[in-house]
Amino acid sequence: MTKTTSLRRFVAHAAIALLVTLLSGCATSTQATASDDPATIIDVVERDWHTDVCIRTEDADARLMRLVVGYNGSHFLCFGFGDRHYLLSRERGPMTLLSALLPGAGAILLTVLRDTPAAAFGADNVVRLGVSEQGIAQLRDFLANAVQTDGSGAPVGLGDGPYPGGLYFGATAQYDGFYTCNTWTADALRTAGIPIHGPVLFADGIMRQIRPAAQAEGDPPAR
């Protein structure tokens, strides 16, 4: 098989995935429902084409808190996924973007917040969802397992993020054109008990489904 044939097949598959994603985003039966009796809350952040999942620091366990040693006074931990080469590269030209469509190592961007995600990213860009005790426990496991560890079990750090409070870590998942930052976020939400339907490649594919289930801003549920 020639390189040209492989490229044509890749583009064709990408076009099919895009069509399926758009169709699933237009379906009326894809609305998520938050927990009727939530034990806590999580926030989903839309940042242009990218999405993050945020949990309260008090809902994190020891495996997650070891990622933020030295960041005292934090209230929320926001986790996002992306292509490692693209995130760490200082060159963000067309070739870097195109290379992210091919399978490659992933990275986790952890953003440590002292304020709420709504205050940090704008209320219009944040959806707050209630989750059950089981849901937050399963989400903790998902996030902890998403971070790559070395032979001693320590997290693989990749350096500081693009702004204060941001940290890069190696990811256990690979990034490619069919498993994007938003596909990863969809998996995280499903793990937390939030039903996300259809293949998800773009941020809108997530936000359109979860906005109807948004919790009103205010105090988190009592424990």
Image: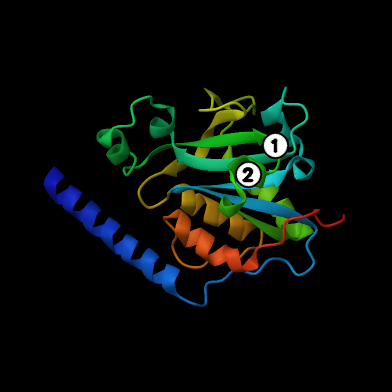
> Is the residue under label 1 in contact with that under label 2 (CB below 8 Å)?
yes
Residue located beneath label 2 in the image: 143
Residue 200 vertical placement versus 119 (above, below): below
Q: Is residue 47 left or right of residue 53?
A: left
Please tell me whether mark 1 sits on a helix, a strand or a loop.
helix
| Residue 79 visible in the shown view | yes
Q: Amino acid at mark 1?
A: Leu
Residue located beneath label 1 in the image: 64
Measure the alpha-carbon separation of dots 2 and 1: 8 Å
| Residue 2 visible in the shown view | no
Number of numbered markers = 2
- Residue most toward the bottom? 28
Please tell me whether mark 2 sits on a helix, a strand or a loop.
helix
Residue at left offset 33%, top offset 61%: 18
Decide which of tag 2 and tag 1 comes sooner along the chain: 1
Q: Amino acid at mark 2?
A: Leu
Camera-nearest residue between 164 and 4? 164
Looking at the rendering, which quadrant does residue 75 occupy? top right
Quadrant in which the C terminus is drawn: bottom right
Looking at the rendering, which quadrant does residue 103 occupy? top left
Residue at left offset 23%, top offset 54%: 11
Camera-nearest residue between 122 and 24? 122
Residue 43 vertical placement versus 163 (above, below): below
Q: Is residue 117 left or right of residue 8?
A: right
Q: Is residue 26 left or right of residue 41?
A: left
Q: Is residue 197 left or right of residue 76?
A: left
Image coordinates of residue 160 in percent, x first then y, are 55, 23
Q: Residues within 10 Å of mark 2 (few under 14, many from 20)?
A: some
- Residue most toward the right? 223
Image coordinates of residue 155 in percent, x first then y, are 61, 29
Camera-nearest residue between 178 and 36? 36
